[in-house]
Image: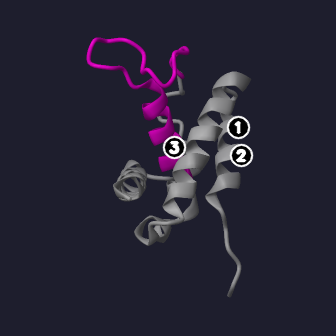
């Protein structure tokens, strides 16, 4: 079987189903796709199933967008309002928190690996 499933489309479908605002959706899609694109260069990240990888990218994207600096100010890279996701938004997708945490960790390693070069 040579078919390939891309988590990028799943990100769009998941965020669309959550009904978050258009502006927040655009910011999250951009950040999640950036993380998923980085994962293409880090094979261990690609070993995760599609939905956990997409959920990990969304969750990590939300975290990165909402990060505060040490003084409690909004991150210098994004001076906009914090994104507010519904609590446990991934449960309807039948994805476990453990699966998402594992995928998120791989995405973080992918970003770190690319920042080395």
Between 51 and 66, the one lying in front of the other is 66
Residue at x 67% of width, y 68% of height: 5
Left or right: 116 in relation to 27: left
Number of marks in picture: 3
Is residue 62 located in the magenta-colored stretch of the structure? yes
Classify mark 3: residues with Cα within 10 Å, few (<14), some (14-19) or many (20+): few
Percent coordinates x, y for residue 39 in the rendering: 50, 60
Residue range in magenta is 54-83
Residue at x 66% of width, y 63% of height: 6
Classify mark 2: residues with Cα within 10 Å, few (<14), some (14-19) or many (20+): few
SS class, disc 3: helix
Compared with 43, 88 (above or below) is above
Image quarter of the N terminus? bottom right
> Marks 3 and 2, how far apart in space?
15 Å
SS class, disc 1: helix
> Which sits earlier in the primary sequence, circle 3 or circle 2?
2
Q: Are marks 2 and 1 in contact (CB under 8 Å)?
A: yes
The residue labelled by disc 3 is 91
Percent coordinates x, y for residue 60 in the rendering: 45, 41
> Marks 3 and 1, how far apart in space?
13 Å
Is residue 29 located in the magenta-colored stretch of the structure? no
Q: Is residue 94 visible?
A: no
Q: Are marks 3 and 2 in contact (CB under 8 Å)?
A: no
**Badge number at residue 13:** 2
Query: Which image quadrant for residue 76?
Result: top left
The residue labelled by disc 1 is 17
Percent coordinates x, y for residue 49 in the rendering: 52, 65
Percent coordinates x, y for residue 8 in the rendering: 66, 54
């Amino acid at each position: 079987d040579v078919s390939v499933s891309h988590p990028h489309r799943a990100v769009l479908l998941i965020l669309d189903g959550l009904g978050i605002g258009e502006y927040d959706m655009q910011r999250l899609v951009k950040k999640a796709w950036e993380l998923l694109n980085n994962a293409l260069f880090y094979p261990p990240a690609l070993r995760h199933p599609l939905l956990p990888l997409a959920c990990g990218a969304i969750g990590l994207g939300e975290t990165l967008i909402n990060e505060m600096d040490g003084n409690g100010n909004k991150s210098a890279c994004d001076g906009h309002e914090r994104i507010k996701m519904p609590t446990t938004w991934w449960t309807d997708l039948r994805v476990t928190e453990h699966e998402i945490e594992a995928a998120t960790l791989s995405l973080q390693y992918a970003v770190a690996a690319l920042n080395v070069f």
